[in-house]
Image: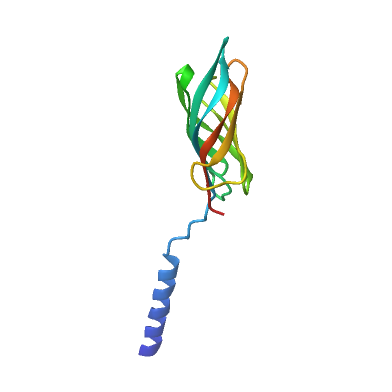
């Protein structure tokens, strides 16, 4: 009887231990574009060559509710515009497109990297801003960091 009680207690202890283990997190893909470049942009009736910059993080392929979501910031130096952005990402493997917008009608832009993704500030990211009534134009960053991690 003692042996039966000991075995039952041991099995119950193992079952409780296994069931109380936290679930393993599912891996998610992360995509980051970061860099500066030069482009030509129009705001209202004013057209200027302008340095621009961006740091945008996106949740790529994932099983969580944030899959495809992007957040970050962009600036357009000649216009004195610095804004947070949010949006979405599409693509896979070596080519990704981020479609982001700032609060209000300031700008809506698309950033696309040129494959292949390389280590360090050695990637090209092309920018196009096309919303009428807001900042429009485009440019390119030849020394961006493009980071892709996860599955």
- Identify the residue at horizontal 47%, vertical 60% (top origin): 23
Please identify the residue farthest to the top as the structure is shown.
45
- Identify the residue at horizontal 51%, vertical 37% (top origin): 143
- Identify the residue at horizontal 44%, vertical 69% (top origin): 18
Measured as percent of width and height from the top left, residue 94 is found at 62, 47
Tell me, yes or no, if residue 102 can be seen here. Answer: yes
9 vs 95: above or below: below
Could you tell me which quadrant the C terminus lies in?
bottom right
Tell me, yes or no, if residue 1 can be seen here. Answer: no
Q: Which sits in the foreground, 27 or 148?
A: 148
- Identify the residue at horizontal 41%, vertical 81% (top origin): 8
Q: Which sits in the foreground, 16 or 97?
A: 97
Measured as percent of width and height from the top left, residue 21 is found at 42, 64
Q: Which sits in the foreground, 15 or 92?
A: 92
Measured as percent of width and height from the top left, residue 28 is found at 53, 51
107 vs 86: above or below: above
11 vs 57: above or below: below
């Amino acid at each position: 009887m003692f042996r039966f009680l000991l075995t039952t207690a041991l099995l119950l202890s193992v079952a409780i231990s296994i069931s109380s283990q936290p679930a393993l997190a599912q891996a998610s893909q992360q995509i980051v574009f970061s860099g500066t470049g030069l482009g030509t942009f129009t705001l209202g009736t004013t057209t200027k060559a302008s340095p621009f910059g961006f740091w945008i993080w996106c949740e790529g392929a994932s099983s969580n509710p944030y899959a495809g979501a992007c957040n970050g910031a962009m600036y357009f130096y000649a216009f004195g515009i610095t804004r947070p952005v949010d949006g979405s990402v599409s693509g896979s493997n070596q080519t990704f497109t981020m479609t982001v917008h700032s609060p209000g009608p300031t700008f809506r832009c698309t950033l696309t990297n040129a494959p292949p993704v390389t280590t360090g500030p050695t990637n090209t990211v092309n920018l196009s801003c096309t919303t009428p009534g807001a900042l429009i134009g485009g440019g390119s960053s030849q020394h961006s960091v493009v980071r892709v991690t996860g599955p």
